[in-house]
Structures are given as C-alpha cells and as structure tokens.
Amino acid sequence: MKPTKALHDLGQSLWIDNITRDMLDSGTLKRYIDEYSVTGLTSNPTIFDNAISNSDSYDDEVKRLFKAGYSGEALFFELALQDLSRAADMFLPIHARTASVDGYVSLEVSPLLAYDTKATVASAKGLFERAHKPNLFIKIPGTQEGLPAIEEAIYSGVSVNVTLLFSSQHCRDAADAYMKGLERRVAEGLSPDVRSVASVFVSRWDKAVIEKVPAELKDKLGIAVSTQAYRDYRDMLDSDRWQQLQSMGARPQRLLFASTSTKDPSAPDTLYVEALAAPNTVNTTPDKTLLAFGDHGKLSGVLSRDGGDCEDMLAAFEKAGISISGLAAQLQQEGAASFAKSWEDLLQSIETKSKALG
C-alpha cells in the first residue's frame, strides 16, 4: 500500500499546497487525487505569484481580462477563482462522500488586510459569494485583527481556513473565534454547520532556530509545537463548550499542519508528514513532499493524545534561549510580511504581463 493511502486510511486528510493552471490542464491534480489520495488543496499569494509569473498558460486570459477593463487585484481574483473553481469541482465528489468534512480548496484574502478587521470581513464575504462553491475555504490570518474577522465570517456563513498560526495559543484563539461565530448563529436560530480548519505552520520554527540551538534540538521545535497544538485541540473537543455546540449540529474546526516541507537539507524529506500523522486532522504539502512521502514515506505511529514529551522538549528550547511565545509572534509577523511581499510581486507581475500582452 502506498504511504499516502495508509495516511488516508489512518484518518488524516492529505492536501496539496499548490495550484497552477498547468496542473489542472495536464491532469497532474487528477493524478494526485487518484494515485496519492489527495483530498483537498490550499493556495496562498506566493503560490499564485509563482504560477502566474513563471508560466504562459495564463497569458490569453490575462490579455482578455485586461481588454475587458480588469487590472491589478480584480484581475488576479478572476484568475484565481477560475483555477480554484475548477479544482473545487474536481474535489466535489470527495466533499459529498465525506459529508462536507473533506474535499476543500482555499483562497486567501489580500494579505495587505492582515491587520484590518473590517476590510477582511468584506473581502471574505465577497470572495465566498463570488465563488459560490460549497467546498471553498476563505483564508484569513489569525492575527489579533484577523480573529474578530474570523468570528464575523463564520457568523455570516463563510467557511474559513485560519492561516498563519504558529503556536498552541494561536490555535486556541482561532478555535475561540470559530466557536464565538457559531454561538452567535445558534443564538439567532441559524445552523451552526459552518466549516473551518486552523492551519499551524511547522517547518518555519526549525528554520528560525537552526543556527541557535545545539545539535540534539535541531529539527525538533516544529514537531513539539505542533504536538502541543494537537493535544490542546483534542482538549478543546472534549470541553463542555464544544460538546454543547456539537450537540446542536456544529462540526469541529479541524487542525491543519501547514509548511510541512523540510527546510533542512540534512533532514529526511518526509520528516514532518511522518511525525504529524493524526486522525481527523489535515496535512497540506507541496508537490515535492507529497511525491517523496508517496515514494518512501513510513508511518510508525500517530501523534500522542496527551502531547507525549512536547512540554519537556519546549522547556529544553526555552533553556537554550528560545522564547516560544516571542518567536511565535515574530514568525506570524514575518509570515504576514512575506505574503504581503508576494502579493505586491504578484500584482506587479500581472501589471507587467497585462501591458506586454495588451
């Protein structure tokens, strides 16, 4: 049995962290679904920047839209919604077969809105309505300004992928925003069946400390943080607050492990996929990591429900001079800035391409 199928049978959804028009046209995405048990897809500004800047497969549509009066952000979202609508249709049978648990694609609001609650809510609602796909998540960052936007979006019936989470506290805050939105719906007699995932980033932790910690701690921080987040996620599902919502028809905000490609060339290329296997969660990987795990990945167990040695491991990093809470805040800020830079590069690429083709 292919390792990706074994992971699927264990109960973890494997999503691809990529989308390009070439993937759709060539049948690559269909092959991932059929041969690698891929059941969903995520995107971000960096992915779309690479897709549009490095391919001519968008040229005809860019030219058409530019002549029709589109430019900048409006032109990008037209391209993105075209791609993601096609991908959503491919995952729709999975979405139906799993009773809306799986089979999602994700589109991020402009990262320039990461610290603007009101504009984030407006963008999330607008994109969700335009796409009109039951299996589309709108990605909203879990910044302090993003949290009330997540609550409002959930209350409005918008499915949300909470992105840029870097710690268990970030995940707990995202879960609280999700439940607040559902509780408001219940209070008004609305269905609490609005779906969400919470994306905790993994490998960026280890990249950030690789030169600052002793060899025995190398490539272990991301797994420790993720294990702690998983333990607290399971605790949340056992809470009276969640149990009450679930009894009314709510479904869990699933924990999603993101940024699971290995950044350290000396570490196994399947490190984070193998270490973070857990039922009723999601792991989203880039193509290279997906193919590597499908080729030689090994499943040796599942994440510990009680967190295993994560607290001892995190204490060892603190002793080595790493502030977990401080670095989580820094990584979230850097992540938001990185996506904003990719966004600006993307819009510049679209402008350049539009003028050249027009």
Image (cartoon, grey):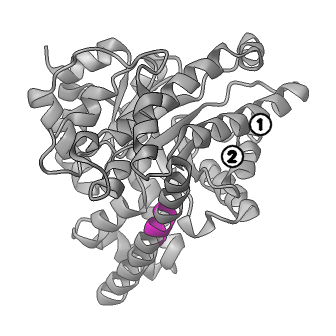
Q: Nearer the viewer, residue 58 or 255?
A: 255
**Residue furthest toward the left?**
295
Tag shown at residue 213: none
Image quarter (top left, top right, bottom left or bottom right) of the C terminus:
bottom left
Residue at image point 42% right, 19% down: 308
Q: Hey, what amino acid is under mark 1?
A: Gly
Tag shown at residue 181: 1
Dominant SS type (magenta): helix
Left or right of residue 227, residue 69 in this image: right
Whether residue 103 is visible, yes or no, is: no
Does residue 35 lie above or below 210 as drawn?
above
The span picked out in magenta is 335-340
Left or right of residue 3, residue 275 in this image: right
Q: Percent position (x, y) of residue 38?
A: 29, 30
Tag shown at residue 150: 2
Whether residue 271 is visible, yes or no, is: yes
Q: Residues within 10 Å of mark 2 (few under 14, many from 20)?
A: many
Whether residues under marks 2 and 1 lie with C-beta atoms below 8 angstroms apart, the answer is yes
Q: Percent position (x, y) of residue 135?
A: 51, 35
Q: Nearer the viewer, residue 263 or 114?
A: 263
Residue at image point 45% right, 71% down: 343
**Residue furthest toward the front?**
319
In magenta stretch: residue 45: no
Q: Secondary structure at mark 1?
A: helix
